[in-house]
Image (cartoon, rainbow, N blue to C red):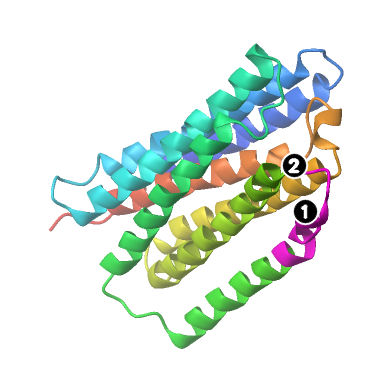
Amino acid sequence: MNKMTAFYIFAVLFFIVSVAIHILFAEDPNMIVYSDALAFIVAILPVVTGLYVFSYFEKGNPEKTVWLILCIGLILWLLGEILWFYYEIVKGVDPFPSLADVVWMLGYPSLFVALLLLYKNVDVRLKSYEVVFGIVVFLIAVAVFLLFGHMIPAEEEFTFLEKAVSLFYPVADLFLLYLALLITGLYWAGKLGHSWLLIAVGIILYVVGDLWFAYLEWMELYGEMAWHPVDFTWIIGDLLVFLGAAKYRISFEEVPKS
């Protein structure tokens, strides 16, 4: 069994266990604890493989800087999950919006800068059809955001802060998605194309999850149950980013040393 197969098996098993826990313990009074615990455990995985990639490159290599900045963003997202767990489980208060959101939001600039640097470091021009494809997918994502996101500002029961935070996530996700799609296009013909496709699809699930969550908060439905199917968009998204980073490192390891 090669390394990447082991990563795929682990991700599938983690997902199966997550689904089983949500189904088998759905009526358990501690289900919210299990659900929030799974959320921050799965958020650890992209950090681990991000650091795995970072450790591969030697000091002075631009890729090492890119993955360091990217890992900072992923670590901030992990801290956001831990703070969410603290507010909801330990303190027993509604964690939205809270310091957890501040930490999550601080993670976006690092991720954006990392992807932008990676895109600029690649000395390859995108083909016209790749640019068009990226723009089309991005515009579809924007259309979905406008379709569902326009309802949030109109809701009078939301405070200004709640509206701003609800809209921030999908908008920021769209910028990350566009850069991830451009990088996928640059690497598509080579070994790294598969890894960036996994990461881009993971970000797509973040967009879907954040829009869905904002809608559920607007409808006051998210807090009505211990867990909601929207939670799986983030779980699968984290697993795909985890796999994408692992594939990125392993792809370099498979290149023969000159």
Q: Which mark is residue 172?
A: none
State the residue in front, 5 or 165. Answer: 165
Q: Which residues are magenta?
A: 145-158
Is residue 183 magenta-colored? Answer: no
Horizontal and vertical percent position of residue 43: 53, 33
162 and 197: which is toward the camera: 162
| 254, 154: nearer the viewer | 154
The location of residue 170, given as percent across then percent down, is 63, 55
Kindly tell me whether residue 1 is visible in this rendering.
no
Does residue 4 appear left or right of residue 167 in this picture? left
Q: Amino acid at mark 2?
A: Val
Mark 1 lies on residue: 152
**Residue position for label 2:** 230
| Mark 1 or mark 2: whose residue is earlier in sequence | 1
The quarter of the rendered structure image containing the N terminus is: top left
Quarter of the view holding residue 97: top right
**Viewer-side label of 1, 2:** 1
Q: Is residue 118 above or below residue 34?
A: below
Q: Position of residue 143 (x, y in %)?
A: 71, 70
- The reply to whether residue 77 is in sight is yes
Q: Main secondary structure of the magenta part?
A: helix
Please, which residue is most extreme toward the bottom here? 128
Rendered residue at 68%/27% (across/down): 17
